[in-house]
Image (spheres, rainbow, N blue to C red):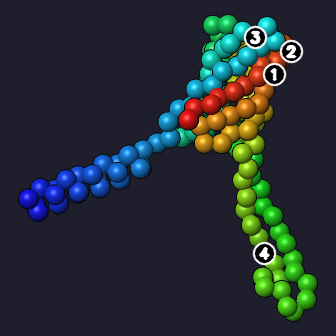
Amino acid sequence: MKNTIKSVSVGLFALAMVTGCAAPQPVPFQLVDAASKIQKGTLFPGDQRIEAVIDGQLYKGFYMVASGVAHSQTFGARQPLSRNTVATFSSNSVRAQLVSDQGQRLLCDFLFESRRAIGECRSTAGAVYQLSADEK
């Protein structure tokens, strides 16, 4: 009985390790135009790729999450931090560029957190799409 429980425990631990190291799953989203027509797309968080299909035309590209470096300096002898402090930060603000096989461009700005996103995309032809994803 002890060996069976030990084997099951080891098996569950191994399964947790394998699934915990799995690549992030794709996040489906939708693009809604001014006429409320819905188009589909997918975010690929593992390698920061993005794809969308608009009126049958496939757009592919990449996205980047905003990040930066902050520097601070303290003055006086009673400061708890060292004189110079550097911190790297990232936000959930994202910018994406997609291109179709025909050379049409789609530029997107959105917020992305976990499996949720909200923002907008603009085509070079002037179309505006509301981007949203809400997978729980």
Residues at discs 1 and 4 in contact (Cβ within 8 Å): no
Label 1: element kind: strand
Q: Earlier in the sequence, mark 1 or mark 4?
A: 4
Q: Look at 27% across and 52% down and name the residue there.
A: 12
Question: Going by the image, does 60 lie left or right of 73?
Answer: left
According to the image, label 1 marks what residue?
122
According to the image, label 4 marks what residue?
85
According to the image, label 3 marks what residue?
36
Q: Quadrant of residue 49?
A: top right
Q: Residues within 10 Å of mark 3 (few under 14, many from 20)?
A: few
Residues at discs 1 and 2 in contact (Cβ within 8 Å): yes
Label 2: element kind: loop
The location of residue 131, given as percent across then percent down, is 72, 25
Q: Look at 12% across and 56% down and name the residue there.
A: 4
* For discs 3 and 2, the disc positioned in front in the rendered view: 3
The location of residue 41, given as percent across then percent down, is 62, 22
Q: CA distance from mark 2 to mark 4?
A: 44 Å
Q: Which mark is residue 126?
A: 2
